[in-house]
């Protein structure tokens, strides 16, 4: 039986909130805005908890990187059934420039430290849409990866993953230890129950810093500017196909 | 670059369907944006925020998409309420050893306020059910608690609170339903009116007369559906609260074991009133939740609706009106939460506070919802828009569990204030 699953959870702006760009165009407004767990991370936690309920894994550890507030997100994972949490403290400038490269280094270090044999992440975060952390983590660890998983089955020391790809569904078999990233249809996350929320208070969240894991947090990416998407322009009605073709040529589209 | 933007938008659009249900996108998304000053999570502990979050999510995903359907077709949403019970909402203040969640009064108020944003009528019924479960848990002996509470907490069985009669509403202590002792049975005769859930529920907590006149002659009995002599009147047609059936409950030589009596003879009125303290807080909480939902719906409508060349949100008058509504909402919420705290701490002012909170919050929140309807203009009158349902559903909160004008009569005000004639005024 596999010992430990590591699940990464990210605290992001709630999906239903209307995003506003900061007046100085350096980013989006996050102060006072409702945050919650990234929906794909919820699916990842749900999958890990289901594996534990099927007794295929022994322990589920939820990890999050960020300032004090991410503890809320870890608590939500604990309320859903994770056994313990790890809060990697990242704040200030480091948090502003925190990206998949740094997070994947942290996760790789933690996976070695915790002797995890399965890492489940959401396929991407809804704030940056990078879709890189899972892949980078696997590369750093030199582990196989099953990304965009819509089905996950553990068969002994192998993992069968059905992936959603452009052409349809691809089924692959991977040797453990593996990294899997969760796609939308992997499962439907459960609601935390009130008794589980109360039990979650007693579960432990360990604190550590990236330095403790020997991770270099310098970013290789600098955000120059953030702008709102262009306002939707009015369309133009054309009379004939020739008209359409000439207008498209004018706009340089063909 | 354009592809990335489209992908991002696609992801966001697809995410709308992540939420457990493919319901009305429109209604659901609108209720999640929060302005800091009316944010209902302000001042709560981390754990309470977690409770609230689950309740809000449940309300948005499992209740809001169906509230109109339940209202128009008069459906008692048993399956949805059982799902809620699985999360712990069936016996919020009942002890965990019989299946309850062991929450405090304030926790429960926060939970019902959040659930109400999904459907005020269903949440109000759930609060009544919770009140009955609490009464059995608090005043029942271990046998009674073990027999009824687990099923009530899981909502395997549903409960109704039977106090009101055709001849006694506000004057509850004058109730006439009699329970004559015959060996180890009480024989009940009489009828109860306006019973929420009546006919569809399984467990009836009935206040009846075992002794002389007045409150001291009243006892509390638990009567199970199917007991011979227990029947129901026709289902009432109501303005709102249509997701819960309301019927008269009729007793004709209905024999109930003495073992089903909660507490001792003559304690029934006391039990009923203690139940109502919590019941009033929760009904008021339902009103607050409905008002919160209506304010958010109105704010969103004002951004969208244009008249005289501008969105309504540019109109100074309407901005003032919305600010007033927000003020009433926060004031109501503060009263209700303060009363909940007083009740859970067993303070001497708890009972009057509960009455005051119910009086204030139900009135103010109805005003808020009514104004919200007005601000939607003609659209507010259409059943396609949720506002009118909140208005209809919470109107009755000003009437039941203590008609607002009755709450004002609380005698403690007269007894406890020192006379002012001894003060010297400058």
Image (cartoon, grey):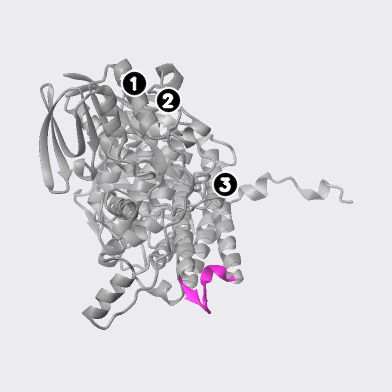
Q: State yes or no: residue B310 in magenta.
A: yes
Q: What is the x, y in percent for residue A130? A: 34, 41
Determine which quarter of the picture holds residue A232.
Answer: bottom left
> For residue B353, which numbered disc appears in the image?
3
Chain ID, mark 2: A
Q: Which residue does the image show at 47% across and 33% down from the upper left?
A: A95
Determine which quarter of the picture holds residue B380.
Answer: bottom left
Of labels 2 and 1, earlier in sequence is: 2
Does A233 appear above or below B230? Answer: below
Separation (CA) of disc 2 from disc 1:
10 Å
Mark 1 element type: helix
> For residue B411, which numbered disc appears in the image?
none
Chain ID, mark 1: A
Q: Which residue is mark 2?
A: A88
Q: Which residue does the image show at 24% across and 35% down from the upper left?
A: A181
Determine which quarter of the picture holds residue B10.
Answer: bottom left
Q: Are marks 2 and 3 in contact (CB under 8 Å)?
A: no
Q: Which residue is mark 1?
A: A110
Q: Which residue does the image show at 17% across and 44% down from the upper left?
A: A164
Mark 3 element type: helix
Q: Is residue A243 left or right of residue A157?
A: right
Mark toward the viewer: 1 or 3: 1
Separation (CA) of disc 2 from disc 3:
45 Å
Does B274 appear above or below A119? Answer: below
Chain ID, mark 3: B
Q: What is the x, y in percent for residue A216? A: 43, 23
Magenta segment boundaries in residue numbering: B305-315
């Amino acid at each position: 039986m596999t010992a430990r699953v590591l699940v990464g959870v990210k605290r992001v702006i709630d999906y239903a909130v209307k995003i506003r760009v900061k007046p100085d165009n350096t980013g989006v407004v996050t102060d006072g805005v409702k945050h919650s767990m990234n929906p794909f991370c919820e699916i990842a936690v749900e999958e890990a908890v289901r594996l534990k309920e099927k007794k295929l894994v022994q322990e589920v550890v939820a990890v999050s990187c960020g300032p004090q507030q991410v503890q809320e997100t870890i608590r939500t994972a604990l309320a859903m059934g994770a056994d313990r949490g790890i809060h990697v403290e990242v704040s200030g400038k480091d948090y502003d420039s925190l990206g998949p490269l740094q997070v994947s280094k942290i996760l790789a270090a933690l996976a070695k430290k915790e002797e995890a044999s399965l890492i489940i992440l959401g396929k991407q975060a809804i704030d940056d849409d990078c879709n890189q952390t899972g892949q980078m983590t696997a590369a750093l660890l030199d582990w196989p990866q099953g990304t965009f998983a819509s089905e996950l089955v553990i068969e002994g020391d192998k993992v069968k993953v059905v992936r959603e790809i452009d052409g349809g569904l691809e089924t692959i078999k991977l040797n453990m230890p593996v990294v899997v990233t969760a796609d939308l249809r992997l499962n439907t996350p459960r609601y935390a129950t009130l008794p589980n929320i109360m039990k979650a208070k007693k579960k432990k969240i360990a604190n550590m810093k990236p330095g403790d894991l020997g991770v270099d947090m310098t970013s290789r990416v600098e955000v120059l500017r953030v702008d709102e998407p262009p306002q939707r322009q009015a369309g133009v009605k054309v009379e004939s196909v020739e008209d359409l073709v000439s207008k498209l040529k004018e706009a340089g589209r063909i | 670059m354009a592809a990335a933007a489209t992908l991002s938008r696609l992801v966001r659009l697809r995410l709308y369907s992540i939420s457990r249900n493919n319901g009305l996108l429109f209604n659901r998304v609108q209720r999640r944006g929060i302005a800091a000053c009316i944010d209902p999570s302000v001042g709560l502990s981390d754990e309470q925020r977690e409770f609230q979050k689950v309740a809000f999510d449940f309300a948005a995903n499992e209740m809001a998409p169906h509230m109109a359907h339940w209202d128009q077709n008069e459906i008692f949403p048993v399956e949805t309420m059982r799902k809620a019970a699985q999360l712990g909402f069936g016996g919020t203040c009942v002890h965990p050893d019989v299946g309850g969640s062991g929450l405090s009064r304030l926790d429960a108020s926060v939970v019902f306020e959040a659930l109400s944003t999904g459907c005020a009528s269903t949440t109000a019924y759930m609060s009544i059910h919770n009140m009955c479960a609490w009464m059995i848990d608090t005043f029942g002996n271990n046998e009674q608690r073990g027999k009824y509470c687990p099923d009530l907490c899981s909502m395997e069985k549903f409960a109704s609170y039977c106090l009101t009669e055709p001849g006694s509403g506000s004057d509850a202590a004058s109730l006439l339903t009699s329970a004559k002792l015959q060996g180890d049975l009480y024989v009940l005769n009489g009828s109860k009116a306006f019973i929420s859930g009546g006919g569809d529920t399984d467990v009836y907590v009935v206040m009846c007369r075992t002794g002389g006149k007045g409150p001291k002659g009243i006892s509390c009995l638990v009567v199970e559906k199917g007991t011979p002599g227990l029947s129901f009147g026709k289902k009432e047609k109501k303005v709102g609260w249509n997701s819960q059936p309301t019927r008269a409950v009729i007793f004709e030589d209905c024999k109930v074991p003495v073992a089903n009596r909660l507490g001792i003879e003559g304690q029934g009125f006391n039990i009923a009133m203690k139940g109502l303290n919590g019941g009033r807080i929760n009904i008021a909480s339902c009103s607050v939740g409905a008002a919160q939902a209506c304010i958010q719906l109105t704010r969103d409508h004002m951004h969208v609706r244009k008249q005289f060349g501008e969105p309504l949100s540019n109109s100074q008058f309407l901005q003032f009106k919305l600010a007033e509504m927000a003020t009433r909402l926060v004031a109501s919420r503060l009263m209700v939460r303060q009363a909940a705290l007083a009740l859970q701490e067993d303070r001497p002012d708890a009972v009057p506070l509960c009455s005051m909170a119910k009086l204030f919050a139900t009135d103010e929140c109805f005003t808020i919802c009514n104004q919200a309807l007005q601000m939607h203009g003609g659209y507010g009158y259409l059943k396609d828009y949720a506002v009118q349902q909140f208005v209809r559903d919470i109107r009755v909160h000003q009437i039941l569990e203590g008609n607002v004008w009755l709450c004002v009569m609380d005698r403690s005000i007269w007894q406890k204030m020192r006379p002012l004639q001894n003060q010297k005024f400058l």
